[in-house]
Each structure stands twice: as C-alpha cells, then as structure tokens.
Image (tube, helix red, strand yellow):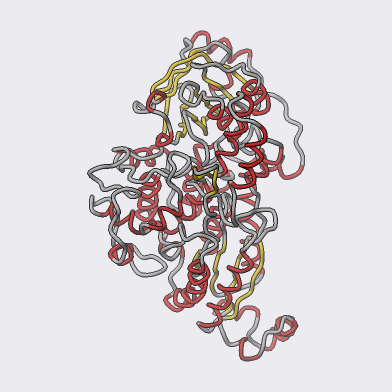
C-alpha cells in the first residue's frame, strides 16, 4: 500500500508514534488509509453542511475496512465575492485548491481519496488535483439548495440580483426586495439553478467520477447522506480494483461530459473548467472541439435561469442518468467507458426513461444544438463563450453601438444610472485572466440589465466571465483579452459590434486601417499588484486555454 511509506518498518516508528497520537490503533495501521478532502466552510451556503456529509463518508470508509483522514481546502463563495475586489480571487482559487491538495496528498501518503466539493471553483480544483495524483478517487458533492419563493413563483439567487435592477428601474420597491432576499435561498446547498456549482457537480457525475445522483439529490435530503456513505464504501472497491482517475477521464469520457453539458444548458464557466481538467488529465480539449460537440448535441433540458425549472425538478424525474439515457438513444454517448460504479451503459440502462417535459425527448428538444456556443471573429480570434440556451431569440443576431468600459464598476454605474439604452452593446474589458487579474464574473451588470427590462435588447461582451446565473446575450471569455492586446482593447464608444450566435461570429465592424492606427497608440494599463494576484497574473494563460497556469501547457 502507498500508505506503507509512512507506517511500515523499523524506520517508521516515529511516524507510527505520530499516527498513534491521532488515535490510530495497531489494527488500523494494517488497513488502507483514505484521505477525505472536504471543503467545509462557514462562508458558503453550499458548504456549511459538509461536516455532516464528511461524517457519512468517513462512516462508509470504516464500513468497508478503511481508515479515513480528513482535511479541508479553501473555497470562495462567488455570490459573496461578487461585484467587488473579492471576485478577482474566485477563479484564482481553483489553482490554489489543486496545488494545496497535491501538497497534502504527497506529504501524507494515502491509498485512496474521497473528494467532497460543492461550489464553483472547488469542484474543478479538486478534479485537477485528482488527475495530478492519480490515486483511486471518487467524488460526492454537498448537493443543491432548494429553490426559493417570490410569492407563488419559484426563484433562485439570480432573481435577487435581477430584482436590484428592477428597483433601480422603479418596477419594484425596496420592501419587496427585502422580502425576496429573505426567501430566495431557503436551505444549505449549492445555488438552486443550473449555475456553475450544479453544472460542475452534474458533469462530475456524467464523466464517471461520482455515483449516480451526485449532481441532483438535494442537500437537505437524507438520500444525500446515504449517497455519501455509499461513496465512502465505494472508494475501497476502487482501491481494490486499482481504478484511477486517468483510467476514467479519457477523451471519450470528456466527450460524454460535454454532451451532458450541452444537453442540460450548463454554465458557460464549464468551458473554462473542462478545458483545465482536460489538461490535468493529459488529453487537452480546445474550443473548436467543444463547439463541434455542441453543434451536434440537442439541448433537452432548460433549467433556471433560462426557465422556471430547477435542479430539484431534474432530480425528481431521474436526474443526470435519465438525461444521458435519452442522449444514448441518439447514439451520442460512449457506453463502454468505466466509471466509479460500473460502465456508463450499465448506469444509464438502470435509469428511468425521460419524462418528456423536464427532460425532453430527442425528437422534441428545446434546441437542436447545445446550450453553449463558441464564437470567433476579429473580436475573439481565439474564441468567446455564450450560454446560447439562455439568450432570447431576438438577440441571437444583433448589431449595435458599443458602450465601452475598462472595468466592471464603471459599467455597473452606467447601467444603474440609465446610460444604457435598447440596442446598445456593453463592452467590459481589462477583466480577463491577466487583466483583472482573475477574470471576474459579471453577474451584477448582466442581472441589472435583465432587471431593468433590457435583457432582450442589450448585449454585453467581456474578456471576463459570467456566473451560471447569467442569462441574456452575455458573451464572455473574449480571447485574446484586452490586457494581452486583443481587439477588444481597441474598441471605442459608438463602434458597431456585430453578434451572430447561430453563425458563431463576433465582430468589431471597424476597418483594419483604423484598428492598426489604434493599435499603434495603445498601451497596456499598468497594474499595481502584489501577493498571489501578482503571481497569478504572471503565469495565467488565456481564457481560451482554460486560464490554467503556463506550466500546464
């Protein structure tokens, strides 16, 4: 066993002494050691209950003859860090999480690992670490939050952000906003819509690194605790079989995950994270490949924020496995692949049939192509990402005058101040991986646009990114970013921006001679950075490459 490095032989007597200080018995010394990597945090509603999930995992490990050792990672709540300096550190945390787990699992040799994430960057950070270490591993998330209420209407967190815009527009009063903030997030768990957290937990299940139900069983249901206990038991089976992450995370498995992504209308952030995980797994995926899969995968689920259907509704009709079963009927799924519990085919054969409403049948999809599209053009030579499944039909093709801002704060002030009018294209730049640094989410400006009634007449493009809660013609990850001299840095107020999502085009309609003159006059803004933000900006790559560090390529 790998754990024998720190517990076997005469020379390891000091090590055993330290282990005994932890309460490890001589009998336990003979058993496999299993790390439990938890992200329990009092800062994040999605993680506040993970101590309970962790205890269930530990019980499962002991049931199956292992000895659990738990440690925690950091985690950033994207909602709490939104629209201020804190958001610069959200995406950055993904790399810190992966690095810290690598440190812990190398310094303390264990035989297998259970990962317990839930929210946004923690899931991909843990998946990247699992690939690096390549020990028998399995994931179990904390599960989604129940949807909230706004009167008789089911809501999620994005409706609260949008309500702020409604107050600014005078269509909602402050008292009703207060009522909404009290009812929108009624339980622990990851935010209730198909935002980034739930997207990544669903994809972890779809790719085969978690048991069925991982992505959709609500956080407050006892089934979540049973799943956690079963996960702890299952990791011992993976150890016995010597089944490792890189045995599961193959190019075909990533294709399955991307099919699922497109079919359920996941967050645009999944493009960043799947790309980053693919590098860690040794089978890199580029944006062209992602778009090609998207063009051939129908969207058969449409969840909040694109509709009033929530992740708990998807769970009620069979969850991810039932959705994969429907895709499989069209020959879109690789059935033969291994997962942490049997093959893909065995799992979906055991699943319920699609209900035809929450999970539509292939002959009646919401869209004939996937929920995410990749756009190219002079504004995005390396690509840009849009969650097209949440874009109004009237905005799928749009041209309008640019309103250009060099940071999120200036854009938000203009939107709240009524300076954005129907037809405009809001451009927010210098918010990319290097330029921010950290590639901030733009939920506040996009939600304000929607809340002010401009969601079907105003577009927003940025070299930053969006929350999974964002809806509308919001195009992010524009690469090359402004700080790297991308064309987005050269745009000026009044320039026409052309968006053609079906045609996969994003263009700044300015002639090459004018652009060349602007480029000669352009200078990258100076940044006053220190600490981790400085190191991050020095080493992070383009959003088109998943914003991984340059040593990953």
Quick one: 440 or 8, which is closer to the camera? 440
Q: Is residue 303 above or below residue 353?
A: above
Give above or below for 520 relative to 44: above
Q: x, y percentage for residue 87?
A: 66, 40
How far from the left and from the top, in percent, is residue 358?
Answer: 35, 49
| Residue under the point 60% across and 26% down | 429
Is residue 228 visible to the viewer in this orientation of the structure?
yes
- The quadrant the N terminus occupies is bottom right
Give above or below for 390 relative to 514. below
Name the spot of residue 397 as percent of width and height, x first: 39, 22
516 and 340: which one is in front?
340
Whether 65 is drawn above or below 39: the answer is: below
Visible in this render: residue 135? no
| Front residue of 132 and 345 | 345
The residue at 70%/36% (across/down) is 84
Q: How far across and how far down the image is residue 424, in percent? A: 52, 17
Instruction: Count all numbered tags in the image, as a single digit.
Output: 0
């Amino acid at each position: 066993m790998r754990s024998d490095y720190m517990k076997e032989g005469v020379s390891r007597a000091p090590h055993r002494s330290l282990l005994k200080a932890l309460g490890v018995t001589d009998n336990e010394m003979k058993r496999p050691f299993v790390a439990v990597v938890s992200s329990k945090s009092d800062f994040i509603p999605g993680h506040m209950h993970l101590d309970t999930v962790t205890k269930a995992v530990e019980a499962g490990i002991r049931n199956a003859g292992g000895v659990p050792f738990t440690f925690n990672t950091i985690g950033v709540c994207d909602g709490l860090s939104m629209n201020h300096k804190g958001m610069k550190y959200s995406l950055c945390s993904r790399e810190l999480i992966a690095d810290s787990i690598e440190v812990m699992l190398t310094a303390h040799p264990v035989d297998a690992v259970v990962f317990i994430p839930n929210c946004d960057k923690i899931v991909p950070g843990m998946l990247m670490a699992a690939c690096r270490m390549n020990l028998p591993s399995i994931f179990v998330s904390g599960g989604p939050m129940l949807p909230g209420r706004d009167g008789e209407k089911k809501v999620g967190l994005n409706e609260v952000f949008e309500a702020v815009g409604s107050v600014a527009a005078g269509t909602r009063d402050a008292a009703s906003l207060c009522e909404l903030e009290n009812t929108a997030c009624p339980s622990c768990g990851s935010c209730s819509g198909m935002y980034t957290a739930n997207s990544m937990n669903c994809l972890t299940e779809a790719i085969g690194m978690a048991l069925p139900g991982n992505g959709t069983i609500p956080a407050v249901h006892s089934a979540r605790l049973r799943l956690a206990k079963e996960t702890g038991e299952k990791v011992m089976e993976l150890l016995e079989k010597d089944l490792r992450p890189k045995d599961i995370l193959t190019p075909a498995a990533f294709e399955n995950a991307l099919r699922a992504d497109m079919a359920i209308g996941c967050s645009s952030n999944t493009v960043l994270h799947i790309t980053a995980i693919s590098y860690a797994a040794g089978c890199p995926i580029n944006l062209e490949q992602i778009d090609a899969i998207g063009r051939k995968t129908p969207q058969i689920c449409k969840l909040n924020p694109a509709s009033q259907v929530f992740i708990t509704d998807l769970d009620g009709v069979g969850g991810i496995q039932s959705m994969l079963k429907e895709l499989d009927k069209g020959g879109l799924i690789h059935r033969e692949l291994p997962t942490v519990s049997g093959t893909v085919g065995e799992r979906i054969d055991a699943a319920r049939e699609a209900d035809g409403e929450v999970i539509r049948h292939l002959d009646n999809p919401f869209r004939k192509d996937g929920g995410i599209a990749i756009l190219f053009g002079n504004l995005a030579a390396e690509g840009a990402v849009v969650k097209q499944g949440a874009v109004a039909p009237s905005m799928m093709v749009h041209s309008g005058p640019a309103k250009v801002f060099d940071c999120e704060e200036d854009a938000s002030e203009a939107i709240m101040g009524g300076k954005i009018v129907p037809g405009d294209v809001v451009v927010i730049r210098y918010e990319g991986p290097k330029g921010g640094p950290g590639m901030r989410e733009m939920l506040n400006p996009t939600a304000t646009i929607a809340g002010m009634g401009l969601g079907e007449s105003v577009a927003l493009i940025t070299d930053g990114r969006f929350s999974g809660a964002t809806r509308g013609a919001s195009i992010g990850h524009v690469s090359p970013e402004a700080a790297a001299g991308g064309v987005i840095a050269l745009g000026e107020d009044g320039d026409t921006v052309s968006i053609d999502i079906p045609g996969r085009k994003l263009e700044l309609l300015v002639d090459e001679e004018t652009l060349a003159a602007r480029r000669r006059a352009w200078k990258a803004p100076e940044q006053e950075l220190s600490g981790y933000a400085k190191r991050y900006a020095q080493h992070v790559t383009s959003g088109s490459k998943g914003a991984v560090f340059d040593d990953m390529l």
